[in-house]
Image (cartoon, rainbow, N blue to C red):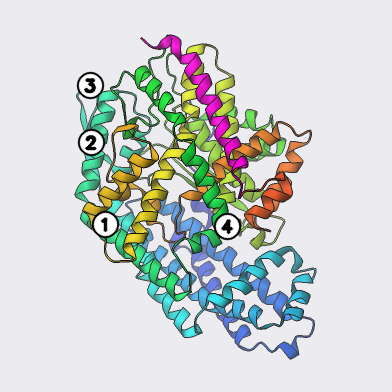
Amino acid sequence: MTYSENWNLIDLYPGGVEGDAFTEKLATIQHQTDSLKQRIANYQADADPDFSEVVALTQLVQDLESGLKTVGTYINGLISADYTNPTYRSVDNRIQSLSAGFNQPFNAYKLLLAHFDAASFEKIVALPELAPVAFTLKELRHSAQRLGRPETEALLDQLKLDGLTAWSSHYDVVAATLDMPFTDENGETKTISAGQALNMLDGYPDNDARSKLMDGYEDMWGQAETITADTLNHLAGARLTEQKSHNYENYLEEPLEMNRMSKATLDAMWQVVDQNKGMFKAYFDRKAALLGTDGIGWQDQVAPLTHVGDYKPETHSYDDVAQFIIQNFGKYSSKMADFAQQAFENQWIEAEDRPGKQPGGWMDTLPDIHESRIFLTFTGSVNDASTIAHELGHAFHSSLLTDLPLWRDDYAMNVAETASTFAELLIADANVQQAQTDAEKVVLLDAKMTNPIAMFLNIRTRFLFENKFYQEREQGYVPAERLNTLMDEAQSEAFDGILNKRHPHFWSSKLHFYIDGVPFYNFPYTFGYLFSSGIYAWAKTQDNFEEAYISLLRDTANMTTEELAQKHLGVDLTKPDFWQAGADLVQADIDEFLELSEQFVK
């Protein structure tokens, strides 16, 4: 079957951002926001003995969140697919204004929940209409304790538009303007965008050209360092100010709260990651030998092996990759396979490789229509199947929750990475298992190592950098030169001295540092990887894996992370044992890689 590499997004609102459907949707959101504000202001507990108005208000809040999420995903999709088009920026700003306007009555709703005495609140969360979202209601009641005066919160929301949110958007504008010359192995030079350069860094086969690409990429972001340092400092400063106003004790408390996990769990995970980083040294020594390079540079982390024995790398078609994913999903879950096929057939994926697209990839939901959209760039490399599978895992997770209230789809980022990474593991293993020769298996094992390298080393780098940066930012502005030093030190520590060429401007080039909605955006990825590794091992012992897996995913927004792991896996996340089991799986892959590849070292 032939699948389109372009998504069907514009038809969501006929006429696009200037059409009647989209205009009417924004007007509806504004009307619902005004209604919510008025109804909460007029609420009288003694006139609501059966709490029917609380039920109605709870539904209205979720309806508003659904609408805002849908239009937000829609405009983000248009921007991502046509990155340099200025048309969408003003529309994005309007949606951000609507979101800021919603926060005021939403905070009033939280305060309303907090005003009920304990006995009354227990009656509310026990109501049949609200029992499915009792966990969220308790979270909202608790979060009300952090709120300041309503007029102060309203001012903070408005200031965010030209503060935290604005600095995040400013980075997008900066990144969209950057380009650089690239000379390939044949001596041909062309100009490529920052997004194209990033995609090429992960997969360009020629060592010398890739090294020069890295030099150019580092230089390009270095030339922008004054602007990006200013952006990062102001974004972090705005975040720290807002956190202080909401009585967070430190900069990690908010992201941990957002991920519904404890500091003890985070510390246990990082402890195991740090203790196991040494296992990558032998792997990278062997990879350098197979690549024919004098050591490993930043650009070589996930570079493809192209000269192993008689193996000839293949470029895979989008249709073949789609069928491969559907087939191998089906070995674990027919529902996963059916969902993947639906996503390909209904054009929920934007995959075309072309200039003007945003770097990276993502999945986001359109809750108003119970669908998702996936954004990425397909190049035909061996890693692309795993990337698509990753995003399909996200989308499958959300698809399992469409029969539940919206707040049951509001799972935290750390567990959000569970289904995606699990799906990615399935496809990476399937790639290895279908190998016909030792040489091919070595190449595919190396491709599979992309994920643990990212989770144990690359993302560990990001956390070490951010942690140190926020400590220093609390004391004042951190200039670009110091940011380069902090990043260089983080890379040296996380990679345990492996890299002979580092990327000091990684802080400047990495979009994740500039995302406004989620502080410390990176550590949930490592959590999700190791958590899903445990689930993958567990899956192989289950007679009815699909049912147990879906049960776990449907609970992800209904309890803390520690409670989820205890209920469904019977493990304590604050202990190192569970995390070490994931590290042991990586060690097993490294051992197999070393054993099989020895014959190909000259």
Q: Which amino acid does label 2 sit on?
A: Asp
Disc nearest the viewer among 2 and 3: 2
Q: Where does the image place residue 178, in percent across and percent down from the top left?
A: 25, 47
Secondary structure of residue under mark 4: loop
Q: Which amino acid does label 1 sit on?
A: Ala
Q: Quadrant of the N terminus?
A: top right
Question: N-terminal of the two: label 1 or label 2?
Answer: 2
> Are there few (<14), some (14-19), or many (20+) residues within 10 Å of tag 4?
some
Whole-number angstrom distance, CA of label 1 to CA of label 3: 36 Å
Whole-number angstrom distance, CA of label 4 to CA of label 2: 40 Å
Residue marked by disc 4: 262
Question: N-terminal of the two: label 4 or label 2?
Answer: 2
Secondary structure of residue under mark 3: loop
> Are there few (<14), some (14-19), or many (20+) residues within 10 Å of tag 2?
some
Let me know if residue 576 is in the magenta part: yes
Span of residues in magenta: 574-602
> Are there few (<14), some (14-19), or many (20+) residues within 10 Å of tag 3?
few
Q: Using the image, determine if residue 92 lies above or below residue 176.
A: below
Q: Where does the image place residue 520, in percent across and percent down from the top left?
A: 44, 55
Question: N-terminal of the two: label 1 or label 3?
Answer: 3
Residue 401 visible (yes or no):
no
Q: Using the image, determine if residue 415 lies above or below residue 152.
A: above
Residue marked by disc 1: 229
> Are there few (<14), some (14-19), or many (20+) residues within 10 Å of tag 1?
many
